[in-house]
């Protein structure tokens, strides 16, 4: 008799079961692969301290689970630490810049130096901070903050010190948005927005972090690049000789023209518009040597935004690649919501186009 080859009848029950299992696994893998492909992956990039992590935190506020008491309790010591660390930097800089002798509240000024960064802020410490922050000589040093490294958003804590020093103080959502913890490595969060799965990645922005991760993200749907408008007269935390805006432009050049991101939508957030609006009233853009070609007058907010926007758009070498852009204030939940809604439509549309469902 002719052998009919591997006809069904020759397979043992175990073999049949094994084939069925292997097909199921294949189907599951295909499904997992498809789900993974359909996930909308957003990568937040930008130089250190541009506001990426604040945008990241806002997404959690807008689309994540509400913050629990537990989480707010964990933020409270971060607020204490940020407040103390930066008021002490301000005290140090008041001395470095030669204003020490003009300080009216000498005893509080000296007492503050002795307080540990890890201390809890009680009424006593709160009063020291309040006196020092109100001092005219200290305010002169604060005016010159572009000359040294300090995180500007801590002014919100200094101005609100009575609330923070109260014995029943617990951090609020807004305090959390102003809090500063340096990001190292990669942080990710998942959201479902309008029925679509979003995954957002926040990556440490400091220079030494960058080369570690860039190649991991060759399939992201969109890159959101965050640049701080207000940093045009400031230098880098890691390299005091490099202007922060120049660094942001260089990094944007590397990202937008990067082969890994050739299929990703590129979205530019010109951030810290609130600080930029204050700064442009007192610091001319062309007073900074790197931007001496800028013809925008002091106080011309719109002109300043346009000037920097044109500098960013000019680095894009691919005429077919559109760069979507928004002017943002990362600490303002309403603004981020409005901006992200506009981005979401672009992201969803480009995602469909990329998967062949749309021309």
Image (tube, rainbow, N blue to C red):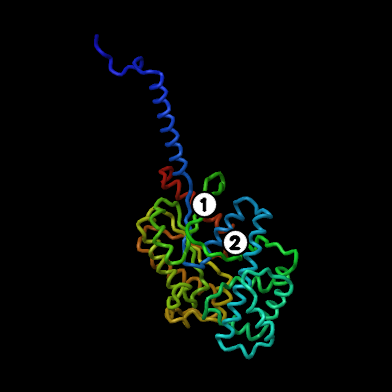
Q: x%, y% of residue 77?
A: 64, 64
Within 10 Å of disc 2 (Cα), the crowding (few <14, some 14-19, many 20+) is some
- Taking depth in this image into account, of 296 and 78 the one nearest to the observer is 78
Measured as percent of width and height from the top left, residue 290 is found at 42, 79
Q: In this rendering, which labeled residue sits more in front, label 2 or label 1?
A: 2
Label 2, label 1: how far apart the Cα atoms are: 16 Å
Residue 80 location, x and y as percent? 65, 68
- Residue designated by label 1: 345
Q: Is the N terminus in the top left, top right, bottom left or bottom right quadrant?
A: top left
Q: In the figure, is residue 217 to the left or right of 176?
A: left
Q: Residue furthest left?
A: 2
Residue 256 in the image: above or below residue 157: above
| Element class at badge 2 | helix
Tell me if residue 307 can be seen. no
The residue shown at (50%, 73%) is 231
Q: Earlier in the sequence, mark 2 or mark 1?
A: 2
């Amino acid at each position: 008799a002719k052998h009919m080859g591997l006809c069904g009848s020759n397979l043992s029950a175990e073999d049949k079961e094994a084939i069925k299992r292997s097909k199921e696994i294949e189907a599951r893998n295909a499904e997992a692969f498809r789900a993974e492909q359909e996930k909308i992956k957003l990568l937040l990039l930008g130089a250190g301290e541009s506001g990426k992590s604040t945008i990241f935190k806002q997404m959690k506020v807008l689309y994540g689970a509400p913050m629990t008491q537990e989480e707010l309790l964990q933020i409270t010591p971060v607020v204490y630490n940020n407040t103390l660390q930066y008021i002490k930097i301000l005290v140090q800089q008041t001395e470095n810049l030669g204003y020490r002798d003009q300080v009216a509240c000498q005893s509080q000024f000296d007492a503050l130096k002795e307080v540990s960064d890890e201390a809890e802020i009680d009424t006593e410490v709160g009063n020291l901070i309040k006196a020092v922050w109100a001092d005219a000589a200290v305010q002169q040093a604060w005016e010159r903050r572009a000359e040294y490294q300090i995180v500007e958003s801590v002014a919100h804590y200094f101005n609100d010190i009575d609330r923070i020093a109260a014995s029943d103080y617990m951090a609020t959502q807004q305090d959390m948005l102003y809090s500063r913890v340096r990001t190292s490595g990669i942080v990710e969060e998942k959201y479902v927005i309008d029925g679509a799965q979003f995954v957002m990645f926040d990556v440490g922005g400091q220079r030494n972090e960058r080369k570690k991760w860039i190649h991991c993200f060759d399939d992201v749907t969109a890159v959101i690049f965050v640049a701080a408008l207000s940093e045009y007269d400031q230098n880098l935390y890691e390299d005091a000789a490099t202007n922060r805006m120049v660094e942001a432009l260089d990094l944007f050049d590397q990202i937008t023209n990067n082969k890994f991101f050739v299929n990703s939508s590129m979205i530019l957030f010109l951030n810290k518009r609130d600080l930029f609006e204050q700064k442009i009233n007192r610091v001319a853009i062309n007073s900074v040597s790197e931007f001496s070609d800028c013809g925008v007058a002091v106080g011309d907010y719109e002109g300043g935004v346009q000037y920097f926007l044109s500098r960013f758009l000019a680095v894009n070498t691919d005429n077919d690649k559109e760069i979507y852009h928004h002017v943002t204030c990362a600490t303002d939940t309403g603004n981020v919501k409005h901006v992200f809604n506009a981005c979401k439509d672009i992201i969803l549309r480009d995602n469909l186009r990329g998967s062949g469902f749309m021309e």
